[in-house]
Amino acid sequence: MQQTAIPFFRPDIGDPEIEEVVATLRSGWLTTGPRVQRFEREFAAAVGARTAVAVNSCTAALHLAVEALALKPGQGVLVPTMTFAATAEVVRYMGAIPVLVDCDPVTMNLDLADAERRLDAVQAGHHLGSRSRGSTVVGVAPVHVGGLMMNMAAVAGFASRRNLWVVEDAAHAFPAAWRAAASDPWQRCGEATSTITCFSFYANKTITTGEGGMAVTSDTRLADHMRLMSLHGLSHDAWGRYSGGGSWDYKIIAPGFKYNLTDIAAAIGLHQLARAEMMRLKREQIARRYLEAFDDLQELELPADQADRIHSWHLFPIKLRLPQLSIDRNAFIEALKAAGVACSVHWRPLHLHPYYQQTFGYRPDDLPVATALFDRIVSLPIFSTMTESEVEHVVSSVRKTIRAHAWPLARTGAA
């Protein structure tokens, strides 16, 4: 009998995506063209943004964002330590300094109170690492971990008070929304929630183009600059030069990058976008089942599920209460792997990576909340193509693993 094998993620690709890709191939136009333009328009409408710029990754979107905002060498940007490499590395691309900020212990999102303290420390010349002393902090890059949005009014107030721009890393947060109170309207992620908001369409994201990203903004000047820089800084893209009514001529306006999205990728994205809310609702249903199934397990801390948030549920991160277990996080993951359940960890905090330790002198106790969380966090599979039997196998495997490794005095009947 073949053992159940549940991947951490499986893309939700249907016949409409496949047919659109085939139609693109048959059209004779494969690179940036009419499908990218349509994808930009429809994505902007979906998030309530004024304009959108499609690119080949969220990393590209973040890089274009900080470049458009004229981030300069030696300046500082507040970046959560609990994030993926891209959020901070684009700051380094510009020769600027990521000032790492600790996270909220419940949501794992950036802790604004800690951001205040670290900004004060930089201004006083007391921050870690000689390379950050004397820096002028000019921006903040919040990340919505797993798709649970931060309070963006609080972020905006902090940024306004400290004279910072805001670039959202919304790689996990489509579709997602927040509101301050039940009587307030929902504000979608990207709906003027920051100076520039950057989304990911990587293979395992909530919608995919295989590889891809999008930057949205209310500032058409910034959008025009990002669009220019996304394709070598040329005055005209390929569609403008080689389509029937175009002109061959172009001028180099600036030394740009090669970050444009192709029509083949946009062909997938158009139909993913049309089903984005349906796929979110499927993930939400899985999340509700997990929350219900694990509610009685005192050995686990479950992810925040707030009434004033529309959660994208890109991730379902649990936190192990290790004093109540006889195994550590890595052994827990291996036990689930042996049961046919693939898991992951989001993430090793940036300050625990060699580059940030060697370059800026970060130590584990410099960001104690994230350091403590790292050894406890496990992301369970959650994706829209999960079958009911796969979900129930995850539930059963987690409960069996807890039952097998809970200390006797801590057991909760994890049958």
Image (spheres, rainbow, N blue to C red):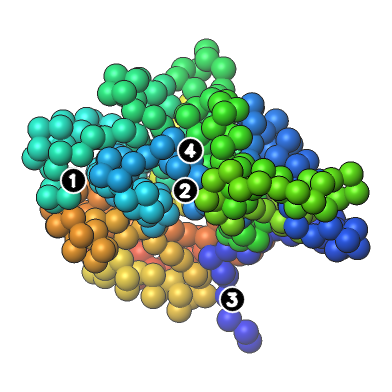
Q: Residue tagged by mark 1?
A: 132
Q: Which mark is residue 68?
A: 4
Of label 2 and label 3, which has the lower sequence position? 3
**Mark 2 secondary-structure assignment:** helix
| Label 4 – label 1 distance at C-alpha | 22 Å
At a point 20% along the width and 39% down the height, the residue shown is 135
Binning the other alpha carbons within 10 Å of mark 2 as few (below 14), some (14 to 19) or many (20 upward) gives many
First in sequence: mark 4 vs mark 2: 2
Three-letter amino acid code at disc 3?
Answer: Thr
Q: Secondary structure at mark 4?
A: helix
- Residue in view at x 50 percent, y 34 percent: 196
How many neighbours does mark 4 have within 10 angstroms: few (below 14), some (14-19), or many (20 or more)? some
Q: Earlier in the sequence, mark 4 or mark 3?
A: 3
x and y, in percent, of residue 189 in the image: 54, 33
Mark sitting earlier along the chain (1/3): 3
Spatial separation of the CA atoms under disc 2 and disc 3: 41 Å
Q: In 3D space, how far apart are the residues under numbered discs 1 and 3 (Cα atoms)?
A: 50 Å
Q: Residue at x 47, y 29 (%)?
A: 194
Give the residue type that dot 1 points to. Ser
- Secondary structure of the residue carrying tag 1 is loop
For the residues bearing labels 4 and 2, Cβ distance under 8 angstroms: no
Q: Name the residue tied to disc 2.
A: 63
In-front residue for pair 2/203: 203
Q: Locate residue 344: give its quadrant.
A: bottom left
In percent of width and height, residue 359 lies at 20, 60
